[in-house]
Amino acid sequence: MLEWTSTGMAVAAKNPAKSKRTREREGSAASREEFLALKKPKGNLILEIDGEHVSLTHIDRVYWPTEKITKFDLLCYYLRLAPHILPFLKDRPAILQRYPRGINAPMFFQQDLESAPPFIKTVRLTNQEGRELNYAVYTTVGSLLHFVNLGTIEQHPWHSTVKHLDSPDYLMLDLDPKAAPWKNVLEVALVCKEVFEEVGLSAFPKTSGSSGIHVYLPLKPKHDYRNIAAVAEALASEVAQRAPKIATIQRSLAKRQKQQVYVDAMQNARGKTIAAAFSARAKPGATVSMPLTWKQIEKGVKISDFTIKNVPGLIKKNRNAWAKFFDRRQELNFRA
């Protein structure tokens, strides 16, 4: 087993503590097509996907009580969206944000994957407290569905892959409105676009699926988190200076004006995560963090426009706005 050190170099661990490997359940397995064709299934079953047997339990459990959306509905969503969401998850460590009893029940974070079936990959990392933990790694559709079965409604990957652990391949700004009106969020997003373009960078927007907008910049994995975070802070500062009435980098809620949108660059630190593109959110309505075009921002969109019920159909109709995201990796020119 390899252990990934804080420098991003892979070295053999002296006494690596491996995740316990659980036995795969035996029995007949449903294919992808058979699974998606089920009508209100109950209990447990096995899904075979790309040669991996994923044990799914309590699939009739209700995750969104008001909307009566079940774990099965969520699994179907991720199964249908796998070709679109996996590029933003594959080979990245995950922080599992688990809601095993649904969005209205207690949630907990899991960083140390103590047990998993054989097809689940892990990477041993040292967290901020200095503890060595076995982080789950997204690899296949089966791995994604296994994590969803654990109650991981939202997908929170690292900004870097295990191959370039200390070099993120995107930078992001989180536009957090709090009490600010939604139109201000859209206006601040367009200011972000303007600032990025003036320095020769092409950014990609998406809804957070919660309350704001995320603006992403795909990068070549050449610089470490410290430098990327510094660039993100500089960009956020410029956005706030250009639109001081509606944008701020002030973290303190008490010191912000109600109409100001917080331009948050703090999520670019090593080990921080944000809801991935196409991730469902544990919010009322089963909203999705939806990739957008800048034209959609200009015309006006709402968080509630995108849910696990309609997103698969919207992608078929309008295509994936971020289909070329990783083809547009850019390089930042600055002195390290």
Image: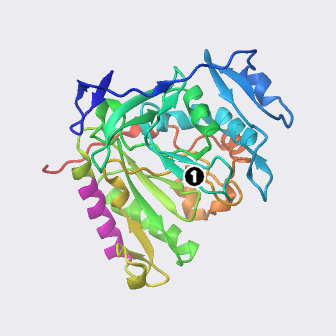
Task: Inspect the magenta stretch and tell me whether residue 268 lies in it.
Answer: no
Q: Amino acid at mark 1?
A: Ser
Mark 1: which secondary structure? loop
Q: Which residue is mark 1?
A: 289
Give the vertical position of 119 relative to 220 (above or below). above
Give the vertical position of 40 relative to 256 (above or below). above
Tell me residue 285's x, y (percent).
71, 58
Q: Residue at x 51, y 61 (%)?
A: 213
Which stretch appears magenta?
A: 229-243
| The N terminus lies in quadrant | top left
Task: Inspect the magenta stretch and tell me whether residue 238 lies in it.
Answer: yes
Give the vertical position of 59 relative to 286 (above or below). above
Q: Is residue 66 left or right of residue 272?
A: right
Total marks shown come to 1
Q: Residue at x 30, y 36 (%)?
A: 165
Q: Residue at x 13, y 50 (%)?
A: 335
Give the vertical position of 58 relative to 301 (above or below). above
The image quarter containing residue 122 is top left
